[in-house]
Amino acid sequence: MTQRSTAMNEKIAWQGTLVSVQPRIRLTRSFDQRNHSYLGYALRVQGIIGEDEREFTVGIGKAARLRHQFRAGDIVSGMAQPVADERTESVELYKASRLKVVERAADVVTVPPPWLGLPPELPVYRQRGHRRLDARTYQAKCLGCIWGCRMPVEMIIDQWNPSQKRYRFETFCYGPKSCSLYRAGPTRKVPGRKGMSWEEENWVDEDATAHRGEDE
Ligand code: SF4
């Protein structure tokens, strides 16, 4: 085993305050087709990881979310491992263990947006559907919101040769369509074979969220 892989497999102790709990969802694109994998939740933590004090992200499964009911403001601790492939994960660390709520956040009622508090179960996100969210808006306004999601995207360029892939990240909003902070940003293009590309136009988002009213 190489030195690097040994280090990658070692778990690191961390502790800090939860900035947000967002869904951890991976998107696979093949031209105009898309498929979601519901992996769990991403904890954004401001605190200490190993020897460093900074903001970092930890992936947890849905069972851990149910057990601990994590929400923004909680002080939490645990151990976790650096992800093996940063292209396919939106978090820095995963395989979390020894998770603990050191101190529960005080019950403070905040006026959304953004929506803080306990995120819903993963099937709720699937049922709601998403709209594309401008990456800069996500970074500036939505990092704390339970409806924001930064997905790792795996793009299969040629369906007859699925090993030909490209990777990127895309940001989405599962929140109410009336959210005053929402900005769609530019449409997204998906590369295909022989230099072709498919543009994901506004109707895709309208279709995915047509079953919801403006304030749902
Ligand atoms: S745009 Fe979406 S993710 Fe951002 S605050 Fe509004 S509902 Fe939340």
Image: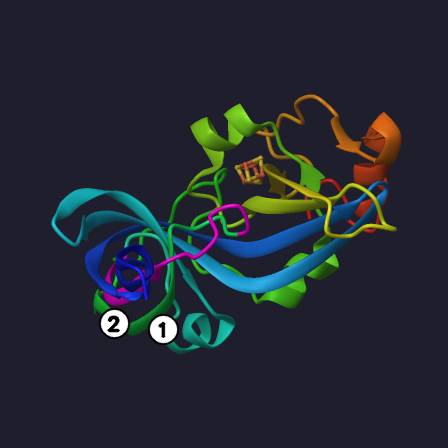
- Residue 69 at what x, y percent from top left? 39, 69
Q: Give the amino acid at mark 1.
A: His
List the single residue furthest toward the left: 51
- Residue 101 at what x, y percent from top left? 25, 68
Q: Secondary structure at mark 2?
A: strand
- Residue 144 at what x, y percent from top left? 42, 43
Residue 81 falls inside the magenta stretch: yes
Q: Secondary structure at mark 1?
A: helix
Q: Check the image and report above or below for 204 versus 49.
A: above
Q: Check the image and report above or below for 45 versus 111.
A: below
For the residue pair 186 and 112, the one nearer the viewer reads as 186
Q: Give the amino acid at mark 2.
A: Lys
Q: Would residue 157 be found to the left or right of residue 40 on screen?
A: right
**Residue matched to label 1:** 68
Q: Quadrant of ligand 1?
A: top right
| Residue at 83% over, 35% down | 192
**Residue matched to label 2:** 100
Residues at discs 2 and 1 in contact (Cβ within 8 Å): yes
Per the rendered image, the range of residues in magenta is 74-88
Task: Compare marks 2 and 1 and give the one earlier in the sequence.
Answer: 1
For the residue pair 30 and 142, the one nearer the viewer reads as 30
